Amino acid sequence: MHNENSLYYRDGQLFMDGVSLNAIAERVETPFYCYSSAAITAQIADCQSAFQKLGASIHYAVKANSNLSVLRLMADAGLGADIVSVGELQRALAAGIQPSRIIFSGVGKRRSELLAALQAGIFQFNVESLPELQQLADLCRQQGCTAGVSVRVNPEVDAATHRHITTAIKGSKFGVPLEQLETALDLIVQSEALALHGLAIHLGSQIVDVAPYRKACRRLRNLLNDLRQKGYVITHLDLGGGFGIDYGEGRYLDFHRVADTFHQELQELNVKIAIEPGRSLVGSAGVLVSEVVYRKEVEPLPLLILDAGMNDLMRPALYQAEHRVMPLVESGRPVETCGVVGPICETTDRFLQRTDLPAIQAGERVALLQVGAYGAVMASAYNSRDMIPEVMVSQNRYRLIRRRIPQSDLMAYEMDG
Ligand code: LLP
């Protein structure tokens, strides 16, 4: 697993599975995202085999990569989806994901979004506040339907990840605070329109240690025992996502370790477990292929200026994330220390402040690694740049799975005059 084995040099060219990335770049203008379907299906299979012994249901967090062709791989493997908007609902359904396997998360679901999800007949709403619960109950009464509900609770466990992607600490905007949990459960029990499933948590993202999960499981176990004693019927636990991938430091969370932890901590509870992995299913399966526009000889380090920018891949600018770079051609040139930046007029448009690479010249191409999750989905058209294409490699073939959205199309939405 964690499959850099889908990337390798053959005859000096960087390949993804059976296709040379330079061969794609001859046909698809850089920059573009490129995913390995084999790497994604391998991650899905690994996740399924790990969580099978728990009988857990897997709901892919669509936000990580919502391209229809990626979602189709999830649907074909029988996965459900964790969605956070009506747009994600539309995508999941269009890709063939069963409504009975869809969970709707998010702190600000609008009335129209709740309604669309009710009409689609989704499996569960993870409700994050008392007013949302009230809104859902009202809507169900008006529509004459029922909704399956879990309460996302804030377990107050620090996931020890980047501060921008930790979600379960006290005072966070996510989840129902522990002190309001019973009020929420009472609302559900008293409403004929709502069917109580159980509790949900999500600790954060890119978590590389099982310790926060273990701690959260123990809290949930105590909470659940306590609630059951008080008479609440809790049948489901949704443990969220957050399983970290290896961005090059060798630290990541193995699905089997997480599953074993859940099993050890929760096995006597007799509940149906759900998980919502996003990044871990797709993150390592994607690269961003980009051309070096200029090589700028400056102090203290030479800079490679790419045609990809922070608008195409926001993670470095937002979270100081580092995505390693590989040249598309193995040149054998001596290694030098350089910086890697984009063309955008912002200081934060920098991919790597300092990295060691065989000397790369203008006009040559590179791949930024592990960008399959939270890459294309977070892109913008800032600086009036095109939205870049996405490509899927399947064995020794590739196909465009999203065309470039050119400036002319973006301008066509504007009223000039
Ligand atoms: N479930 C819920 C309720 C979530 O909020 C998230 C992610 C997931 C599941 C999936 O988490 P994952 O398995 O992908 O870690 N843009 C950031 C990550 C934001 C994650 C937001 N929530 C990044 O690029 O690192």
Image: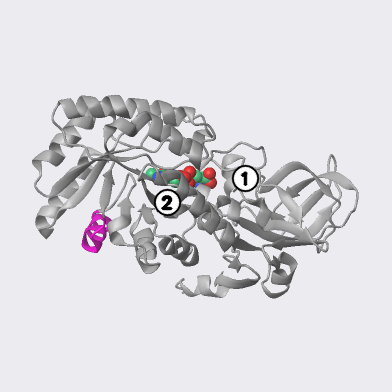
Q: Is residue 377 above or below residue 243?
A: below
Image position of 8 (left or right of 87):
right
Viewer-nearest residue: 18 or 183: 18
Q: Residues within 10 Å of mark 2 (few under 14, many from 20)?
A: many
Considering the numbered disc 2 on the image, is that residue within a helix, a strand or a loop? strand
Q: Amino acid at mark 1?
A: Pro
Marks 1 and 2 sit apart, C-alpha to C-alpha, by: 21 Å
- Tag on residue 316? 1
Q: Which residues are magenta?
A: 111-122
Give the x, y percent position of residue 150: 25, 42
Is disc 1's CB within 8 Å of ligand 1?
no
* Magenta-span inclusion, residue 119: yes
* Magenta-span inclusion, residue 270: no
Give the x, y percent position of residue 142: 10, 57
Viewer-nearest residue: 304 or 267: 267
Q: Is residue 144 above or below residue 192?
A: below
Residue lying at the far front of the rendered structure: 53
Nearer to us of marks 1 and 2 is 2
Is disc 2's CB within 8 Å of ligand 1?
yes
Q: Amino acid at mark 2?
A: Ala
- Tag on residue 61? 2
Q: Earlier in the sequence, mark 1 or mark 2?
A: 2
**What residue is at 55 percent from the left and 55 percent from the top?**
42
Image position of 232 (left or right of 363):
left
Considering the numbered disc 1 on the image, is that residue within a helix, a strand or a loop? helix
Q: Is residue 9 visible?
A: yes
Q: Quadrant of residue 287?
A: bottom right
Q: Residues within 10 Å of mark 1 (few under 14, many from 20)?
A: some
Image position of 354 (left or right of 30):
right
**What residue is at 86 percent from the left and 45 percent from the top?**
336
